[in-house]
Amino acid sequence: MTETILGLLRHGQTDWNIDFRLQGVTDIPLNATGLAQAEAAGQKLVRADWDFICSSPLSRARDTAAIAAKHLGFEEIGIEDLLLERSFGEAEGLTYPEWKRDHPSGVPPQGETLEALRERAHLLLDRILLNYRGTRVLAVTHGAMIRKLLRIASNNELPAEGERIGNTSLNVLVHDGTHWSVLSYRPQSLVDGDLGRTPSI
């Protein structure tokens, strides 16, 4: 049975990653380290592994995707709105301690609930099968979305409690014609050995 492969590449570092601030749908650009991470990650990706590349519409993902596409030899990048980061509403811009202090329920005012994020992640997986069944898609997206997709594909086993999804990490899901599962789990950045570990929120 033909498999469908979905690679989940997290965008490079931003200044808000360094400060451990909730970014959500605020369009924070890559910083110099993030651009270097994207270049280094692009050099590690293998063209033969991928048929298409798509991205969240936020610039930190789009710019990471553009750099990866350059190294892979893709002329076009598909923009997929369902790859957007979780919206944290009024909490965007807060540090994580501030977020926990001001919103102990974990539900941000005017933001996206975890259940709504889960529903959107399922819609994304359905859309991948509808548009790209039997191919290998590299999707550049965000930490909360990647976590949710991994939870769905692993029956809530991954990521481990407290484990972070690093900037420019690559995790891979596979659909075997029946269900999604995790083909490769690597929460660390593809380029940790080259650029050192960096904040990964």
Image (tube, rainbow, N blue to C red):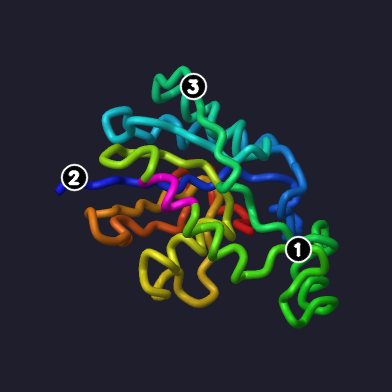
Q: Is residue 102 left or right of residue 52?
A: right
Query: Which residue occupies 80% across, 77% down?
Result: 103
> Tag 1: residue type?
Gly
Q: Which residues are magenta?
A: 124-129
Predominant secondary structure in magenta?
helix
Nearest the camera: 189 or 172? Answer: 172
Earlier residue among tags 1 and 3: 3
Residue 94 rendering spot, x and y as whole percentages: 82, 63
Residue 53 rendering spot, x and y as whole percentages: 44, 33
Disc 1 versus disc 2: distance between alpha carbons? Answer: 38 Å
> Tag 3: residue type?
Glu
Disc 2 versus disc 3: distance between alpha carbons? Answer: 25 Å
**Quadrant (top left/top right/bottom left/bottom right) for the C terminus:** bottom right
Query: Which residue occupies 72% across, 50% down?
Result: 25
Instruction: List the residue tagged with mark 1.
Output: 111
Is residue 12 a member of the stretch shown in magenta?
no
> Tag 2: residue type?
Thr
Is residue 125 a member of the stretch shown in magenta?
yes
Instruction: List the residue tagged with mark 2.
Output: 2
Q: Quadrant of residue 183?
A: bottom left
| Location of residue 116 with respect to 189 vertically, above or below | below
Disc 1 versus disc 3: distance between alpha carbons? Answer: 31 Å
Query: Which residue occupies 32% across, 59% down?
Result: 180
| Location of residue 126 with respect to 131 vertically, above or below | below
Earlier residue among tags 1 and 2: 2
Say which of marks 2 and 3 sits in front. Answer: 2
For disc 2, the neighbor class at 10 Å (few under 14, some 14 to 19, many from 20) is few
Instruction: List the residue tagged with mark 3.
Output: 76
Nearest the camera: 21 or 51? Answer: 51
Query: Which residue occupies 57% across, 48% down?
Result: 82
